[in-house]
Image (tube, rainbow, N blue to C red):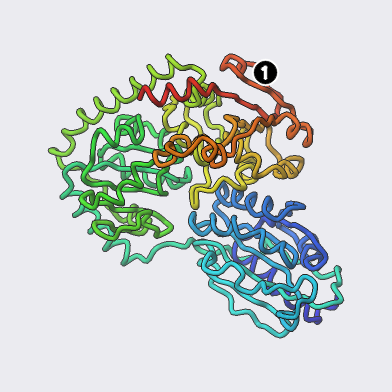
Amino acid sequence: MSASSPNAQIIAQLLRYLADSGVREVCVAAGARNAPLVAALAASQGVKLWNFFEERCAAFFALGRIMTTQRPVAVVVTSGTAAAELLPAAIEARYQGLPLILVTADRPKSYRGTGAPQSIDQACLFGSQVLAAFDLDEGDAGSWVAPQEILRGPVQVNVCLAEPLETSPSGWDFTQGALPPPAGDAEVDCAASAALLRDWIDAAENLVVVAAGLHPAEAADVAPFLSGLQAPIIADATANLSGFAELQDLLLAGGERTLHAIAPTAVLRIGGVPSWRWWRDLEDDPAVSVVNLCSTGFPGLARRENVRTLPWGTVAKTQVWQWPEHCSLRMATHRAVAKNVRSKIVAAMTAHPLAEPSWMASLRQRIPAGSRVFLGNSLPIREWDVACGDVCQVTFANRGANGIDGLVSTFLGCAVDTEEAWLILGDLSALYDLAAPWIIDQIAASRLRIVVINNGGGKIFARVPGLKALPEEVRSIVENRHALSFEAWAKLWNLDYHLATTTQELDVALPDVCVIEVRPDAVQTEAFWASL
C-alpha cells in the first residue's frame, strides 16, 4: 500500500492517535474490511495484539485489561453486524468510566443507505454510550478528542476504507506515543469540593462510609483519608480495602444487614455503586443524606433531593482530620451490631453447609491471599459479601450496568500476567459467554480457576418479593431453569473439569487451568436465607 494512498493516510492517522492516547494493547477480531488495520498493527512496535474470532469476547476481554492496567485498550473489528457486537461492552465501559476505544472498519460513506453488503450505518452506532464518535473517510483530517479525555470512558472511531484493501501498510512505533496526562479533576473544583465535604461530615450525626468498586490503586489513595476520618466503613465485595491494617477497626462485617441495623442518616459513598438492595431502597428515603465521591460522576441514585456527587480528586484535597468525638462514640455500638450480624451468618452457615453462601465462604477461605478474583453479577457478588472471609484477595466485577454477559471474557482479561486468578459466576452467566476460553492459550497466567455455581437457573429471581407470587410455570420461565452440566464446555476448550457437590471436594489438587462446577443444595440455600 502506498503511503500516500487514502487508506494508508487514514490508518496512519488512527495508529498515531491510539499511540498518543496510551494504547499499548489491541484486541482484534479480524475480517476482510479491517484486514489493512490488522496488518498495520501487526507491523507496529510496542503494541500487544490479542486475537479473537468473536467481537463480544474481544470487547469484554479489553475491559478486563483496562480494569487491571488502568490504561486504554482498543478493539478493532470489521464492518456490518460485527460492529454492533461491541455495544454491551461499550455500555459497561460507559458506566464504569473505562477507556475502551472501539475501532470499527467500514465501507466508504457513499455506500450508506444503499443496502450494499456490509454497509450498515456505523457512524455514531453507539449513541450516548460513548463519550465521542469519529467517522473517518478519504480526506477527513479527524477532529480528535484530547487523549486525556479518553481516560474517562469509551470512544468510537469508525474508519472508512475503500477497495482495494491492500494489506501491506506501514506500522507505527507505539513506544514513541506520548502518554496522556491523567484525566484529573480541576484543582479549583476539588478544593471547593473538599471544603464542602468537610462541612458536610462535621454536621453529620450518624455517618457511615459505603465503599465499592475501587481499583487497588484507588483503595490505596483513599485509605489515609478513611483512616483519619475514623468513621465506620461498610465495604462491598469490590472495595479492596480489607488489606489495610489501619482500617481494620473501622471495617464492619455484615454488609447491607449491618446497614439496615445501623440505619445511618448520612452516607458517604466512595467509589462505585454497591450491589446491595439497601442502596436501591435509598431512592425512597430522601431523609438520608448521600454524598458520592467517584470518578464517573454518576450519583448511583435517581432522586435529586439530599444527594450530591463530588469529583474523585476531592479525596486528595481533603485534609485528614478526626471525626467529631460525639460521632466516634457510636463506633462501639456499630461494632456490636456488626458482630451480632456476623454471628447470625456464621450460625446459618454451620447449620446449612451446602447452601450457596456457605459454598462461597468455603471458596473464600481456599483462594490464596493476593489472588485476583472476578465476581459474577446477581448472586455471586452478593454471596461473597455475606461470606465475610478473612483472606485478602483483589476483587473485580462488571458493576457498571450489572449485566451477566461477557463475564468470563472480562475475567480472562483481568487474569493476564498474574500468578493466580479465580472467576466465580452463575450458570446462566457462563452460558452467556461460552466462546470466552478461546483466548486462554494466549494468556500468560500461572493458574486460572473458573468456578460455575450451577443452581439450575437464575435463582436470584426466586428471592425477588414481587416474583414469588407468580404461578410456578411463569417462575420457571423467569428463572430459565435447566439441568445442564458444564463438563462438555470444559472438554470443548480442552480444560480440566472438576465437579464439587460437597465442600470437602474443593480440597483436591487442582490443575493449573480448570473449570470447577459447584452444585449447591437448593433446600439448604432456601433454609439459609430464611434463617436470617
For the C terminus, give its image quadrant.
top left
Q: In this figure, which residue is indicated by the disc labeled 1? A: 509
Which percent across, then down, holds residue 76?
Answer: 71, 62
Residue under the image location 33 percent in, 37 percent down: 234
Left or right side of 520 for 35:
right
* Nearer-the-camera pick, 215 or 119: 119
- The percent coordinates of residue 299 (x first, y second) are 36, 56
Which is more toward the observer, 355 or 14? 355
x, y percentage for residue 57?
A: 68, 50
Count the marks.
1
Say left or right for 485 vs 354. right
Up-down: is 315 above or below 15?
Answer: above
Q: Amino acid at mark 1?
A: Ala
Question: Residue at position x 47%, y 62% from top?
Answer: 183
Is residue 155 visible to us here? yes
Sort mark 1 into few (<14), some (14-19) or many (20+) by Cα contacts within 10 Å. Answer: few
Question: Which residue corresponds to the image point at 36% horizontal and 34% vertical from the top-left?
Answer: 255
Observer-nearest residue: 43 or 5?
Answer: 5
Answer above or below: position of 142 versus 367.
below
Q: Position of residue 342 (x, y in %)?
A: 34, 24
Q: Is residue 471 left or right of residue 204?
A: right
What residue is rendered at 24% in x and 56% in y?
306
